[in-house]
Amino acid sequence: MEAMNPAQASRTVTVANRAGLHARAALLLANCVREFQAKVELVMDRQRVDALDMLQVLSLGANQGQSITLEASGLEAEAVLDALERLFAARFHEDEAEGEDH
Amino acid sequence: MKFADFVSPEAIRAELAADDKESVIREMVQALLDAGKLDAGDMESIVRAILNREELGSTGIGRGVAVPHTKHASVDQLVGTVAVSREGVDFDSLDGEKVYLFFLLVSPLDRPGDHLRALENIARQLHNETFCRFLKQSKTREEIRQLLEEADNNQFGS
């Protein structure tokens, strides 16, 4: 932990929803991050992408069951990870209502 | 997954006439129908389903790209097409920018994996600025088809 960056945190989550990290999940992810004063990157295998960049997030092609490390920095680093952890655990609110959307 | 696995070459549109979200979707679904990939009787239902999906959050994912899509019972494999708009279309994108490149996908009900792989391929290829720029500049279906083929052969690196 560097003095220059007093608030840094990371956490590993699992993609739990059936459809994986698809377009709407990526949008919910970006919207969630935007509510906090923090920058978040997703690290998967050797790839590192900005959570706000949907094109990059979709390029991960993260399936159900995939582990992703979330790395946050900024004033609300812990808070944004708490919120993101809930979002992943809640399967992006989609498996309970499997309909036409995805 | 490669573009050739889901993009119907005959349904590619180099110069979209449409200038709003609904008409873009209609024009692209019509293109798939004209290419024999969808049945005319399913057109309205598919257009509605794609528009309903847009209501949940725009598929304008930024950098001038949108991926309108839906699942639909009428298809038994992933079908898709590509279209380019010269003027750009307001698609309620995440970054507020107009959209120039459209990738429309219709998936079977039970194959989320294929849909995800197609999105992954689209996003990876568009991450390459050269591919993105050439695609936006394409003037004919054949030019787009060749670009997709070159991308499939990793000629842009990624």
Image (spheres, coloured by chain):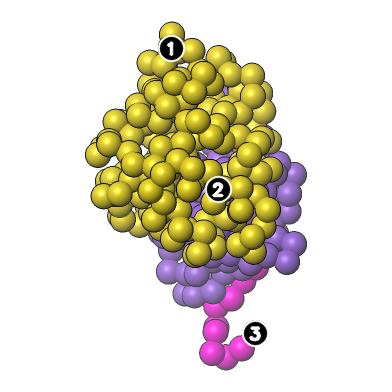
Q: Which residue lies at the image location 47% right of the left edge and 69% below the top edge?
A: A38
* Label ID, residue B146: 2
Q: Which residue is mark 3?
A: A1
Which residue is at a point 50% across and 69% down the rendered structure image? A39
Name the amino acid, label 2.
Answer: Gln
**In the rendering, at what x and y percent does residue A16 appear?**
68, 41
The yellow-tinted chain is: B
Query: Is label 2 on the same chain as label 3?
Result: no
Q: Report the residue marked by disc 1.
A: B40
For the C terminus of chain B, give its image quadrant.
bottom right
Q: Residues within 10 Å of mark 2 (few under 14, many from 20)?
A: few
What amino acid does circle 1 point to? Ala
Q: Which residues are magenta?
A: A1-10
- Across and down, in percent, residue B124 comes to 59, 55
State the residue in front, B113 or B9: B9
Residue at image coords 61%, 88%: A2
Q: CA distance from mark 1 to mark 3?
A: 61 Å
